[in-house]
Image (cartoon, helix red, strand yellow):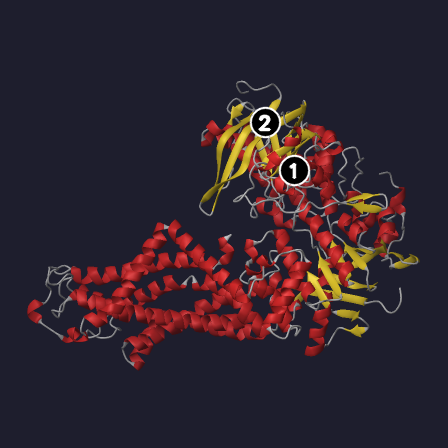
Amino acid sequence: MGRGAEPGMVLEIEDLCVELSIEGRWVRAVDHVSLSIRRGEVLGLVGESGSGKSLTALSIPRLLPDNGRIVSGAVRLLGEDVRGQSEQAMNRLRARSVAMIFQNPTTYLNPVLRVGAQIAEAFEVNPDLLDGPASPRGISAREARRRAWRKSIEYLRLVQIPDAERVARQYPFELSGGMQQRVVIAMALARQPDLVIADEITTALDVTVQAQILGLLSELRRATGMTLLLITHDMGIVAQLADRVAVMYSGSIVECADVRSLFRQPRHPYAKALLETVPVIRGNRTVFRPIPGTMPPLTDPPGGCRFHPRCPDVLARCAGVKPDSVHLEPGHMVACHLYGAR
Amino acid sequence: MAVSIEEARSGRAAGAIRSATASLRRSTFATAGLAVFAAILLAGAVAPLVIPGSIVREVNFAAKLGPPDRAHWFGTDDFGRDLFSMVLLATRLDLGAALGVVAGAIAIGTGLGALAGFVKRLDEPLMRITDVFLSIPSLVLAMAIASVLGRNIENLALALTFVSWPIYCRLMRGQVLSEKEKPYIKALRTLGVGRAPMILRHIVPNTIFPVIARAPADVGLVLITMAALSYIGFGPGPYVPEWGSLVAAGQAYIFQAPWLVIFPGAAIFLTALSLNLVGDWARDVFDPRMRS
Amino acid sequence: MSGPPLLDVTCLTKHFPVRTGFLGRATSQVRAVDGLGFQIEAGQTFGLVGESGCGKTTIAMLLVKLLEPTAGHIRFDGGETSGLGRQAMKEFRRQVQIVFQDPHGSLDPRQSMLSALIEPLRTLGIAADRASAADRAREALELVGLGPEILRRLPHELSGGQRQRVAIARSMAVAPRFMVLDEPTSSVDVSIQAQILSLLADLKRRRALTYLLISHNLVVVRHMSDVVAVMYLGKIVERADAATLFTEPLHPYSAALIRAIPVPDPDATVSAALVRGDVASPVRVPSGCRYHPRCPFAESVCRDVEPPLAELAPGRHVACHFPGVARDSPS
């Protein structure tokens, strides 16, 4: 679909730098981030708030907030760099290729439109997604609406909403949080996007509802083979859903590996420490260890490696020089002086 | 490193001043507005010291309706008086009255509004009273008071205060109602803080600034209303310099001597505009939640 | 366990009227807390878990007297807590404190930390003058690991973790005996969570505190609590000591909650969600056992008869017609 695309590579972010304007100054919020996702893969992007993961994701459909800008780097969706595209082309991309799901479904659903209508919007914008016979003169608007409505109900069923026909006629406020989030997922899938970005989609939900949504996502993966960029701070979710994991800290990716390698043998001290802060029930006790200190503010980052003030394995050069990314094995990247090329 | 109470307090003040000047530097509109308003304020304060008040009665029909020239920068009015002096003298009166009205309205309105929001039993009665006042058309009330009590600036100001306080009351009540539910108020209750200190020390400082942010724009509005009242004949007479009456007097000569309307009108316009700009800036400065 | 419990709650009920209709008549009730009871011994950490709408936050409000109960009794240290006079209320407030979920919201945005710390000391009559109050404030900050430079800051100048520590310091400064911790780590990051929990555990040891820990995060509750109660729609459905509850939950809802926790282990088998549908609303409480519409093991008796909270073994209470049924289901 694009020139020079590696076959099967849906997303390629190369050396992305994003800045935010805070109190009149531009601060670096995403610093030389590179990642890639193949078709059908789930990449988990893990980090705490302020790590830059959401901004990285928002760069893909170029939906950065007004006070943000992409400074450098490439964001290649299906081989085409989004930075060069016109706004019209971007709108087509957003309508068709990239779907984003956010944390709070209530704020992302139009309160005055019925739920079915909101899913059907995907077909207004992408009429080619409607199936059924097309007459030589094209189908009438009324017929298009009917088909769109029927397809909306199909998608509601796909996200395991019971009594889909009735729910389609309801308004968002009539649905619970879990149902609303399922609707948003249906809206995203209706477009048959190449990439789905899910940004903390279960954080606002109760734990039993979260378990249901995660189960749904697993099912959907199997059924539709969707490509997913899963952003979360919850290591448990990542372990359950992701194929590969990228860990972000203060604007940079510090480690990226397949999920088993990361959980079994985390290399970067932050990744290690992050895994240890998650309280885990081990036998009769719960075990966790806090990381001392706090994530540095974007306006005043430490020099060199941004994690060095909190790092238990800090070396002398960490304060002065930012570590480059090193590939320990194919597919396992670390940015840390402990593993740097001398 | 021991930190005394004084140090803690002064640190806060220094921080506040710093962010105030920072936001000023960032917005040219705010700086311009502040500068213009400061200039007008200065002119109003200085004018009565420099220009003798007797000028108002120095009628000189021979020189009436003169165009702007080197002797009379704004021309002369229908009584032959120097329009520039009249406009400047009017500054203190108009601005003073408008500021007085808004200050009074805020004092009454926020006081009652805070009570209504905080004390549930007072809410209903106070809101009904507010409704009554809100339904009175301001011009009609002002005219009524002016007719009964006499057409002077003080009564005009009184009338306008009467019709201006309800909006502040409503706004304040709304703010207090929502502020009351916030977690920090609940926390303070568990820490034993009583009702009176709660309202005075915590709720009012946190709610009053968005309400007060209206004030500069309202001063502008009051100014224009006073001008309107003067225009329809309820203002103080021709021997009291007031922008509105100057415009009213000048409108009869609008084709022969348009400067009679232009200059006082411009004074009203500039004052109201600069006040609006200052109002926006003041709100940015005074609301620490917007500062992060 | 000697002596009476520090906190004794019986038949606690709190209903909120839903006012609709022309004259604002109450058409139905939100039965937030519906006749529950529990005891907390001195020195214990009592964990209360449940999802949204279960009433745990309402219980927190009731215990610290931000709300008055519709019915039932709360006894603290042997004494009734309703109808207290001003002096007695002050004494109560000194002894019972609460840490809220939202560290950003629990501090007055215009108050410096010094002022925020001093105020309760003066209103509760603990410090005689500003100087001694300031000293105590500094001590309290030290206790939570913050330096005196924090005193001159405003809330928006601090990080979430720092704000939460100041809120804890503020409560600790009045030297309470009992602290209600309402989701103390839910609004902060994972790495800060661990710090705050460590701090709370440390404070408990050093100051001989008793905690009621409310959270929807079961692992946090497991880590900190001695005894845990599970709430659903205003009632306690299971109560046991922490280790037992987490290894052998008897109520299907407890089992569902525990199995719903995503485990940070890619090879862990994912159990099918043991619960259907969404959390019910406390306005329309289901008949019989409140959990029956969502319970995969519900039988007709569950729809008709509400199971009482029965003590199956010392310290082990369950409200279910078929306790332990979830244990045998495949995970």
Please name the amino acid that badge 2 sits on.
Leu
Name the residue tied to disc 1.
Answer: A314
The foreground one among A307 and A106 is: A307
Q: Position of residue B44 (x, y in %)?
A: 26, 67
Seen at 63% across and 31% down, the residue is A337
Chain assignment, label 2: A
Q: Secondary structure at mark 1?
A: loop
Can I make out residue A67 in this image?
A: no
Q: Is residue C207 above or below residue A278?
A: below
Q: Position of residue A79 (x, y in %)?
A: 55, 22
Tag of residue A11: 2
Q: Is residue B283 above or below residue B163?
A: above
Q: Position of residue C170 (x, y in %)?
A: 65, 63
Seen at 47% across and 72% down, the residue is B130
Seen at 55% across and 75% down, the residue is B122
The foreground one among A219 and B119 is: B119
